[in-house]
């Protein structure tokens, strides 16, 4: 890799489009679309969009912390029991905090080697399946999981991901 290629390498991440999900009358949660656009050789897909909820970010931070004991990880926005999708300020603040967390993680070479990070950002696997896949306990590899995740979604929204990430992150 030449110096020019290294200088031109980029990883753009965008956290956007919060959606409220109601499981039943007592249980609701918000998830966010995470769009990645990159030319980095670290990533199998150059554009991808997945949806993740706050608790999955907490899980990811915990995993990264176990794997990289010597690195001080960025903080996540604090959990708020009174979080409301209708409160634009709270939603915006949380999205900004989640995006800032991911931006710092993606600038840390040691963390980029964690397959759980790649599965989190580029697959639609839940955290249980991400753990199993990262440990080699599935019929598919990490690369296969990423490649086949959201195939229909990916083809329909590949241009959207590129455009949104460019607008949001570049």
Image: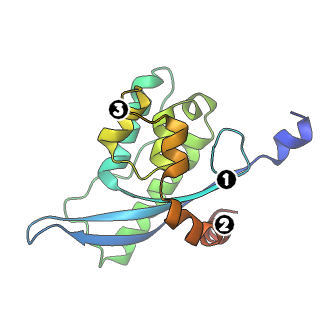
Looking at the picture, tell me which residue is in the foreground, 123 or 114: 123
Q: Which label belongs to residue 162?
A: 2
Looking at the picture, tell me which residue is in the foreground, 140 or 75: 140
Secondary structure at badge 1 equals loop
N-terminal-most mark, 2 or 3 = 3
Looking at the picture, tell me which residue is in the foreground, 54 or 100: 54
Q: Residue furthest front?
A: 139
Q: Which label belongs to residue 132?
A: 3
N-terminal-most mark, 2 or 1 = 1
- Kindly report which numbered mark, 2 or 3, lies closer to the viewer in this rendering: 3
- Report the residue marked by disc 1: 46
Secondary structure at badge 2 equals helix
In the shown orientation, is residue 5 left or right of residue 108? right
Q: Residue 5 in the image: state x and y as whole percent.
A: 86, 42
Question: Residue sitting at 59 percent across and 42 percent down?
Answer: 106
Q: Are marks 1 and 3 in contact (CB under 8 Å)?
A: no
Q: Are marks 2 and 3 in contact (CB under 8 Å)?
A: no
Q: Residue 98 in the image: state x and y as whole percent.
A: 45, 54
N-terminal-most mark, 1 or 3 = 1
Quadrant position of the N terminus in the picture: top right
Question: Residue sitting at 37 percent across and 77 percent down?
Answer: 88
Question: Residue sitting at 36 percent across and 28 percent down?
Answer: 137
| Few, some or many residues within 10 Å of mark 2 (<14, 14–19, 20+) | many
Q: Residue furthest left?
A: 26
* Above or below: residue 109 compared with residue 98: above
In the shown orientation, is residue 17 left or right of residue 79? right
In the shown orientation, is residue 26 left or right of residue 147? left
Question: Residue sitting at 51 percent across and 65 percent down?
Answer: 152
């Amino acid at each position: 890799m030449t110096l020019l290629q290294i200088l031109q390498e980029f990883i753009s991440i965008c956290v956007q489009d919060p959606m409220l999900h109601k499981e039943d009358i007592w249980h609701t949660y918000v998830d966010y679309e995470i769009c990645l656009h990159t030319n980095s050789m670290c990533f199998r897909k150059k554009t991808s969009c997945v949806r993740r909820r706050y608790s999955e970010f907490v899980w990811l931070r915990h995993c990264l912390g176990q794997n990289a004991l010597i690195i001080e990880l960025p903080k996540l926005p604090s959990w708020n029991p009174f979080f409301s999708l209708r409160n634009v300020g709270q939603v915006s603040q949380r999205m900004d905090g989640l995006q800032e967390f991911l931006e710092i993680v993606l600038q840390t070479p040691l963390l980029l080697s964690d397959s759980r990070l790649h599965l989190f950002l580029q697959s639609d696997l839940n955290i249980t399946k991400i753990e199993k896949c990262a440990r080699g306990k599935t019929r598919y590899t990490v690369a296969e999981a990423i490649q086949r995740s959201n195939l229909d979604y990916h083809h329909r929204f590949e241009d959207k991901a590129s455009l949104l990430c460019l607008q949001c992150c570049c």
